[in-house]
Image (spheres, rainbow, N blue to C red):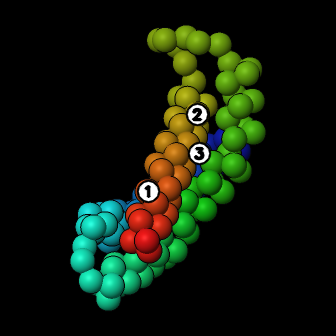
Amino acid sequence: MQKMNDIVAISGLLLALTTFLFNLALPKINQALQLDEHMSGEIARQKARKQVRATLLLPVLPLFLAFFALFYVNLPAAAQIVANSSLRLWHFEVDTTLYVLVECALLAFVLYHGWLIYRLAVKSRRLGD
């Protein structure tokens, strides 16, 4: 049981750290997503494309990889917990429930960052045309 508590604590700490890094990068991500794709002037479009690509490669892709690695590492244990557990609404084990919830949060962040990668790649391509 102590091993599970340690894993939950480490996963929670890493999730908190990567979430903190995501919150630091969020203004830059929003700024890149709000750039006008139909701006006039080739130089302005090149600067915007460079800004979108820099946002994609610096904060978004590394955060996606970090969240994906955390998700992938914790997935076997979470799947085993779900497979070996029964659903009890009032008498559940807090440790295993938290572990599965942390895994769900990691999945949400992986999907969100995948969506951000797609949106930024499309925006970069549109700015390049």
Q: Please give the name of the residue rendered at 50% of the width and 56% of the height, measured from the top-left corner.
A: 118
Crowdedness of circle 2 by 10 Å Cα count: few (<14), some, many (20+)? some
- Give the label on residue 100, or none: 2
Give residue 9's position: percent from left, percent from top. 56, 50
* Kind of residue sitting beneath label 2: Val
In this view of the protein, which residue sits in the foreground, 42 or 28?
A: 42
Of circles 2 and 1, the one toward us is 1
Q: Residue furthest bottom?
A: 43
Residue 6, relative to residue 46: is it above or below? above
In this view of the protein, which residue sits in the foreground, 12 or 112?
A: 112
Of circles 3 and 1, the one toward us is 1
> In 3D space, how far apart are the residues under numbered discs 2 and 3 (Cα atoms)?
9 Å
In this view of the protein, which residue sits in the foreground, 91 or 55?
A: 55
* Kind of residue sitting beneath label 1: Arg
Residue 15, relative to residue 87: is it above or below? below
Element type where label 3 sits in the image: helix
Left or right: residue 87 compared with residue 73: left
Left or right: residue 64 compared with residue 76: left
Crowdedness of circle 3 by 10 Å Cα count: few (<14), some, many (20+)? many
> Can residue 125 be seen here?
yes
Q: Please give the name of the residue rendered at 44% of the width and 74% of the height, measured from the top-left corner.
A: 128
- Give the label on residue 8, or none: 3
Res 68 → quadrant: bottom right
Give residue 54's position: percent from left, percent from top. 45, 79
Rendered-image quadrant of the C terminus: bottom left
* Kind of residue sitting beneath label 3: Val
- Give the label on residue 119, or none: 1
Element type where label 2 sits in the image: helix
